[in-house]
Image (cartoon, rainbow, N blue to C red):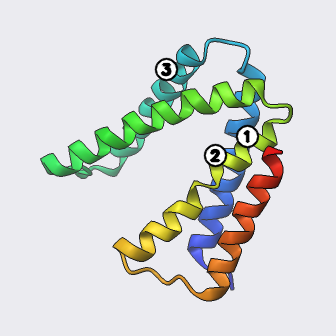
Amino acid sequence: MLQPWFIYSLFAFFGYFAVNFIFKLISNENPYLMSLLLYGCAALAMLIVVLSEKRVVINSFKNIALASLAGIFSVIATVFALKSIKIAPNPGYSVAIYSANFVLLAIISSLVFKSELSLTKFIGIISIFAGIVLLSV
């Protein structure tokens, strides 16, 4: 039986595919305006979700600060993603490179959160980096 995290990941996979495909469709527009519209729509959708849950989601200054910092990085990343997709010969190349952030996340998580990082997974990480290098040449 498939684990719930895997099913959620598949939904995210298709969702991010749609986002990146739409990014390519709108990449000739102003990336700052597109980012603003994207995050405005996302904020409205999240507000609806939060209000429908009828509970406090962010209840401390630390969480508010961290969520704000994540939002700032997200906007910056989206602006650069739009710019890279616009000028890349194939939007898949750009998306592959910036989506490889999960590799850094896996390495840092193994150090900070003591997550598992086996030899097999480490070899996979090296393979991903090799693929990124091959895409960039």
Residue 31's spot in the image, x, y percent? 60, 18
Number of labelled discs? 3
User: Label 2 is placed on what type of residue?
Assistant: Tyr
**Which residue shows up at 57% across the image and 60% down it?**
102
Mark 3 Cα within 10 Å, few/some/many (few <14, many 20+)? some
**Which residue shows up at 61% across the image and 79% down it?**
3
User: Label 1 is placed on what type of residue?
Assistant: Ser
Q: Is residue 27 left or right of residue 81?
A: right
- The mark found on residue 36 in the picture is 3
Which quadrant of the figure has residue 13?
bottom right
**Which residue shows up at 74% across the image and 24% down it?**
86
Q: Is residue 82 left or right of residue 107?
A: right
Q: Which residue is mark 1?
A: 94
Tag 2 or tag 3, which sits nearer the N-term? Answer: 3
User: Label 3 is placed on what type of residue?
Assistant: Leu
User: Which is more foreground, mark 1 or mark 3?
Assistant: 1
- The mark found on residue 98 in the picture is 2
Q: Secondary structure at mark 3?
A: helix
User: Which is more foreground, mark 3 or mark 2?
Assistant: 2
For the question of whether residue 51 can be seen, the reply is: no
Quarter placement of the N terminus: bottom right
Residue 30's spot in the image, x, y percent? 62, 12
